[in-house]
Amino acid sequence: MTNVPYTNLNKLFIDGQWVSTGDFEPVLNPSTEEIVGLAPCGTISHAAAAISAARKAFDEGPWPRLTQLERTTIMRRMHAAIESRAAQIHALELATVGVSQFIGSTLAWTTPLDHMRNACDRSLLPTLRHLPIETTPNLMNPSAGMQIGGGVVVRDPVGVVVGITGFNAPIVLNLSKIVPALLMGNTLVLKPSPYTPFQALLFGEIAEEIGLPPGVLNIVTGSADVGQLLTSDPQVDMVTFTGSDKVGAAIMGQAASTLKRVHMELGGKSALIVRADADVQKAAMDGLANIGILCGQGCALATRHLVHNSIRPAYIEMLKAMSPMMKVGNPALDPSVMVGPLIREAQRASVERYVQSGRDAGAKVVLGGGRPAGLEKGFFHELTLFDDVDNSMKIAQEEIFGPVGCVIGFDSDDEAIKIANDTRYGLMGAIHSGDAHKGYEMALRVRSGGLFLNGGAGKMQDAPFGGIKRSGFGREYGDRWLEEYTQEKTICFPIGR
Ligand code: NAD
């Protein structure tokens, strides 16, 4: 086994204690297929213990009762503790996710930490709302005449939150649950993907270091049975999930009988629209990045490239010409690698089935299409682009979660919008247009949770993120992120007597 940071974490973190499971599961490096560590396997009894600990910490512990400043101060210590582990966490991400060094130090690192800092700042903004003072009849005693009434609306934490996350950007996803839940005074049970357990367990070490009270943050591993208990137990008040739409739908069913609040961040099949007047080079670069980042394992990537038929050949030639910039390989060994592996052999087999289904349906492979030469070990796949795709094909409708893009031609803006919206998903999207005004008008008509016009505006700290349709509901980041983890309580009182 290799010496990867945090892969020695072989216990669960429940009620402030490290708990042995007695059962372990190998975690692989997808670039080499080597075992990097043995992760503890959580069971439903561990999940039950974690829920009880979180319940007790919420009902009886200090955490929800601290002042906001006290909680935020502790969460700022968590931010510093994460930052101080930058090198080790990068090494873990490279070894277990196969993220490129570039994305590992930007989108998957500074972005979530900046969101965390922003959330800490925002948590200190006043949230109490005053209701207008009114002269009202006394409802309990109408003959008593009128009274003056007033009130306030305060925000309470929701209670015990369960956070369940996928594998593709584990630090980002785990922080997207930990930060708002804890800042707002909830307690949390976090369950990561079995592919990336150490990116959650390391928060146990951080919780100890910063002095989080026991039971505030509990970390259990496990598969669907553990997830099932966590999302159906009556002691849990809210489930926040990032993963596939299929599992998201199952979780909504599991959470329904106890009427939990649910927050869903799910998959996508976003459209990148390239108008006839677009800068073809910029659009093709964007298209290429949307195929290659995280080896296509990104929810928000735009993998349907809707290109005006007049420039479709030029777009494809440009994207192909630039494709060597997205070098495929083991990112831990080479900082110039931009595309790492797929997470497991099963994921690569699934991608290969999609590529075959595209060929069978009559689409034409114009780039890649198979396994890259010279990479015998590791779950690698070539960047792949299909042309002559019809939007009804499986490769255009289903989330492949691999480095595969589909080019679909169109002849008018209306047609492009129709195709863009003809999907069960609605997460993100992109438009390239020489006429910014026309592009903006189209952006207003695309049904998605967000959209980048002409490449977007760089890092926007306050931009909310989330989907519609089968991409989920609820928003992360921005001004509503913290609110999602609170509930309003109205307190009314008479004034003047
Ligand atoms: P997945 O849905 O297979 O698994 C996600 C988590 O759910 C894992 O921890 C898994 O163990 C758990 N799980 C499985 N069955 C469960 C059940 N019945 N009850 C409770 N938990 C259960 O997702 P994945 O393959 O790990 O991640 C990829 C998916 O996540 C893609 O669809 C991607 O688009 C999506 N994603 C969405 C966002 C977003 O913010 N919208 C971000 C990242 C990834």
Image: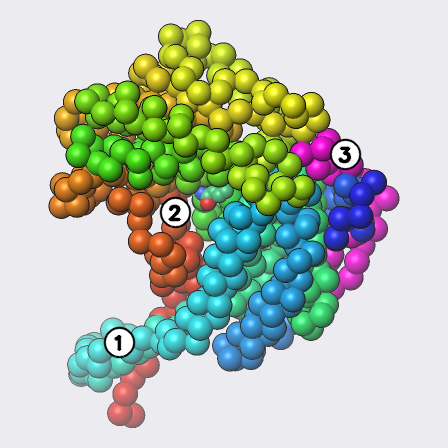
SS type, badge 2: loop
User: Does the CB distance between marks 1 and 3 fall below 8 Å?
Assistant: no
Residue at position x 68%, y 64% in the image: 206
Q: Which residue is mark 1?
A: 131
SS type, badge 3: loop
Q: Mark 1 or 3 closer to N-term?
A: 3
User: Does the CB distance between marks 1 and 2 fall below 8 Å?
Assistant: no
Mark 2 vs ligand 1: CB under 8 Å? Answer: yes
The label number, if any, that marks residue 34 in the structure image: 3
Q: Mark 3, mark 2: which one is toward the viewer?
A: 3
**Ligand 1 image-quadrant field:** top right
Q: Is residue 297 left or right of residue 396?
A: right
Q: Is residue 247 left or right of residue 456?
A: right
User: Residue 410, located in which quarter of the rendered image?
Assistant: top left
Image: 389 above or below 447: above
Q: Position of residue 181 (x, y in %)?
A: 52, 61
Q: Nearer the viewer, residue 85 or 39?
A: 85
Q: Is residue 408 left or right of residue 17?
A: left
Q: Nearer the viewer, residue 392 or 416?
A: 416
| Gap in angstroms between the C-alphas marked 1 and 3 | 61 Å
Residue 256 in view: no
What is the magenta range? 9-35
User: Does the CB distance between marks 3 and 2 fall below 8 Å?
Assistant: no
Residue at position x 66%, y 38% in the image: 195
Q: Nearer the viewer, residue 85 or 18?
A: 85
Q: Which residue is mark 2?
A: 466
Is 20 colored magenta in this rendering? yes
Is 19 colored magenta in this rendering? yes
